[in-house]
Image (cartoon, coloured by chain):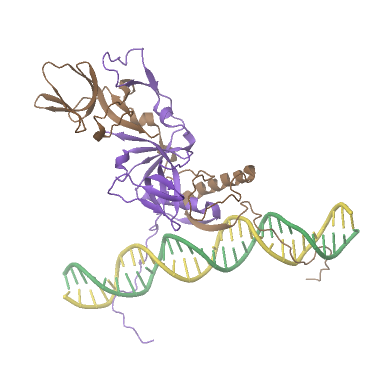
Chain colours: A purple, B brown, C yellow, D green
DNA sequence: CATTTGAATAATGTTACAATATTCAAATGA
DNA sequence: TCATTTGAATATTGTAACATTATTCAAATG
């Protein structure tokens, strides 16, 4: 070893990485998990990270929501539109009941990208997702692929799984051996709010 | 220490605890988890354990369990969603509360035509309509024109009122002296349900 | 032959460690 | 003087190692 003259840098106090500068911005702990749940826990961590990055926003459904029935009309009614003041109402609808079939298994996700525009999903829309429904082919699903949160249409064909974007400008995701795919649930409805 | 004469037991081969005799009946792995998710993961493990106990290997004890890199379409344990929100109660969503601001003045309409496709309104969608909001220009409104029920985007310009379709295949409706126009309310959101 | 015992082995929670990532003042040089 | 480069200091993070506890069951015992 020869003596290396220092050309830059130097010792000092107060150097070093900042606390909580990791991906979780908080302390971590090691825990032991059965192998069959490792992927699932990983996916949970990924969702959490995505939320921290505010890539996604996930909300759960409110089990204590009071019921509220509101009249619904069909726009087919051409004339003599019945006033909502009438008690002669066609029908009433409670959004929570109508859109949520399995309360415990339902959660909401706020859509981010534009990859599903042609499926009617716009950035900022609220997606209603049911974890208890089977992820059948051609359903729109919420998935985590290799740690990335995504909304795509699921296709299974001859054992090959593809997540299809519904916007020609976006690429489909073909799942192969090396990919980790976790499906969180099936999108049952989209809610778009106007400004 | 004095020499203790062995009174029972003895060395032998094949002794020892059996493999997979732990609570999970499978190998485990340590992983690092942010402290705020530790409880959540623990409860996931607990659910898993209780399922193991009751199910007594109902599913995929050997069926195929392609858990190598392949999806957990029907993961046995439905984990809750992690939330970075401090108050866990606040990330529960009541659709009624979220979408309906003036309960008394709100009603639903089921959309019929395709004239508003580009505004994201498809046939069969549920429109949330608020009667109490001012029908400003550029808002999507529910209107009755000469007795005909319609959903269009309202435009007011220099005293001229137009109801614009949001689909090039449909004509706009220009309101003139002789027309009767009644605006029932402003569409605040659209809900589309997937089959 | 039924009961007791303890050596062998696995599970499990925690700590330790090595490798990587990040920070930012000192060193440099323009 | 000031912008850029550098590397010591410190944190993160995945995994291995460890200590403790739990379990198993044949040998020892009576």
In this picture, residue B68 sits left or right of residue A79? right
Vertical comparison of A100 with A57: above or below: above
Residue A93 lies, in percent from the top left, at: 39, 23
Can you say which quadrant of the picture contains the N terminus of chain A?
bottom left
At x 35%, y 38%, the residue is A126
A54 vs A74, nearest the viewer: A74
- The quarter of the picture where residue B83 lies is top left
Residue B131 lies, in percent from the top left, at: 27, 22
- The quarter of the picture where residue B17 lies is bottom right
Residue D10 lies, in percent from the top left, at: 40, 65
B25 vs A179, nearest the viewer: A179
A3 vs A126, nearest the viewer: A126
At x 47%, y 56%, the residue is A28
A89 vs B170, nearest the viewer: B170
Vertical comparison of B32 with B166: above or below: below
Residue A192 lies, in percent from the top left, at: 31, 35
């Amino acid at each position: 070893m020869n003596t290396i003259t220092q050309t830059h840098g130097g010792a000092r106090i107060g150097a070093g990485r900042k606390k909580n500068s990791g991906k979780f911005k908080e302390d971590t702990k090691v825990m032991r998990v059965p192998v069959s749940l490792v992927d699932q826990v990983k996916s949970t961590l990924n969702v959490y990270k995505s939320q921290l990055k505010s890539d996604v926003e996930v909300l759960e459904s409110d089990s204590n929501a009071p019921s509220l029935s509101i009249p619904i009309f069909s726009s087919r009614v051409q004339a003599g539109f019945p006033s909502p003041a009438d008690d002669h109402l066609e029908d009433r609808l409670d959004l929570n009941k109508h859109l949520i079939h399995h309360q415990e298994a339902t959660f909401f996700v706020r859509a981010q990208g534009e990859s599903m525009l042609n499926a009617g999903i716009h950035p900022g829309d609220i997606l209603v997702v049911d974890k208890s429904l089977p992820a059948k082919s051609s359903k729109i699903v919420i998935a985590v692929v290799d740690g990335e949160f995504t909304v795509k249409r699921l296709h299974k064909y001859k054992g090959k799984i593809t997540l299809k974007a519904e916007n020609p400008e976006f690429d489909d995701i073909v799942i192969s051996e090396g990919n980790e795919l976790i499906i969180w649930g099936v999108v049952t409805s989209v809610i778009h709010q106007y400004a």
